[in-house]
Image (spheres, rainbow, N blue to C red):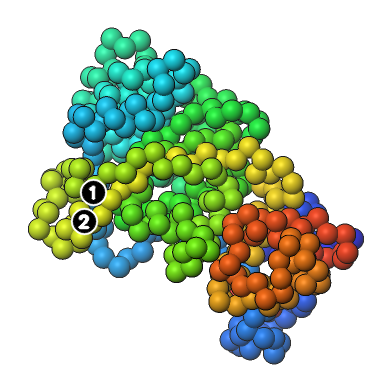
Amino acid sequence: MWIPVAGLPLRLRLSALAGAGRFCILGSGAATRKHLPARNRRGLADSSPQLLPEPDFRNPPRKASRSSLDFKRYVTDRRLAETLAQTVCGKPNRPPHLLLECNPGPGILTEALLEAGATVVALESDKTFIPHLESLGKNLDGKLRVIHCDFFRIDPRSGGAIKPPAMSSEGLFKNLGVEEVPWTAGVPLKVFGMFPSRGEKRALWKLAYDLYSCTSIYKFGRIEINMFIGEKEFQKLMADPRNPGLYYVLSVVWQVACEIKVLHMEPWSSFDVYTRSGRLENTKRKEVLELLQQNLYLIQMTPRRNLFANSLTPMNYNIFFHLLKHCFGKRSATVIDRLRSLTPLDAADILMQIGKKEDEKVVNMYPEDFRRLFETIESSEDCTYKWLYDDALEDV
């Protein structure tokens, strides 16, 4: 039985029409109740489900000027570069992967990667480095290509014309001769670099949406990401119920999606820091001094081959995200309480099917538990509608 989708947000209509996530519409009075606060509409409890909007990746938060916070880190130590190249490239006898290096800057690491046998595509967002990087590729028979591109601005969601260093993945990969492969095939290429110093969380969210929807770079297969990440965000990313204070939605999203390995740990102080203008950052600044006391972690995130083997699909992943956001909205609550405002199914029975008790708390659920919870609801045959959604609760 199909349901009306006129009240659904655009990003959920496709899921409903495909039958991946079927909703029971509770009401449609939003248009006539714009003057009412969302929490008071139709007298529903605060715990009633509200679809959370997708993050806006277009503009960075304006807490401080970009010039004061935006700086880049580069590997300039030759020994460190050789260590990282050997770590990412693996054993010499392995077939080399095409490697996209993000913002290589002075090219110290690029040289080490080439010497380790990698075929490198240097995606550099700063034009001042490009001539030097291009000179490194002379007499290498095409083992190095340099492109003016910012990896973290591939397929920007701002709309309009795309101008360098932003770029479309379709154009980039076509230029490189990279073709789409099935999700269950091997890793088609690797990405190596550092998450933006002041935008790690935003970058993780954008990549997560791209991965689960199999769009952008993930349209071409299970792209392996090798990135340095700051200590604080690393701890959150790897957290689980054993670290309840750090455990949050992105922890679940990425641990469900990928096999995550720590390849290397390096003190912040091992990297040279430059501002947007190219000057070496003044290490007397308080914010930089605080960072220098921390470590950077090189993590490898390989999408799981069986991610979409069951009921979780690129068509209904947004409902999975909503379930997580809704549950972690009251992280100390019991799962059964959060489920009652998400699904018309018997919440106690759903928990029993995944081996959980009725008093199980949100923060005690491991990432795989959330996946099984979602897939159990999606595959249930006990009810025509799987999910509750009240479009009167959506901001209009």
Would you place residue 289 above or below residue 28 in this image? above
Look at label 1 and name its amino acid: Trp
Where does the image place residue 295, in percent across and percent down from the top left? 28, 50
* Callout 2: SS: loop
Question: Would you say residue 55 is visible in this rendering?
Answer: no
Question: Would you say residue 92 is visible in this rendering?
Answer: yes
* Callout 1: SS: helix
Q: Residue 96: which disc?
A: none
Name the residue: 14% across, 50% down: 281
Name the residue: 24% across, 62% down: 65
Query: Left or right: 272 with respect to 262?
Result: left
Query: Left or right: 377 with respect to 299?
Result: right
Quadrant, the C terminus: bottom right
Query: Left or right: 382 with respect to 6?
Result: right
The answer to which of 351 and 376 lies nearer the viewer is 351
The answer to which of 247 and 124 lies nearer the viewer is 247
Where does the image place residue 102, in percent across and percent down from the top left? 35, 36
Q: Earlier in the sequence, mark 1 or mark 2?
A: 1
The residue pinned by badge 1 equals: 268
Where does the image place residue 244, in percent across and percent down from the top left? 48, 67
- Work out how far the residue at label 1 is from the one at label 2, CA to CA, in angstroms: 7 Å
Where does the image place residue 305, in percent across and percent down from the top left? 63, 37
The residue pinned by badge 2 equals: 293
Look at label 2 and name its amino acid: Gln
Quadrant, the N terminus: bottom right
Quarter of the image for residue 145 reads: top left
Crowd band around label 1 with a 10 angstrom C-alpha radius: few (<14), some (14–19), many (20+): many
Query: Left or right: 385 with respect to 375?
Result: right
Name the residue: 61% across, 72% down: 361
The answer to which of 194 and 174 lies nearer the viewer is 194
Q: Are marks 1 and 2 in contact (CB under 8 Å)?
A: yes
Would you place residue 235 above or below residue 134 in this image? below
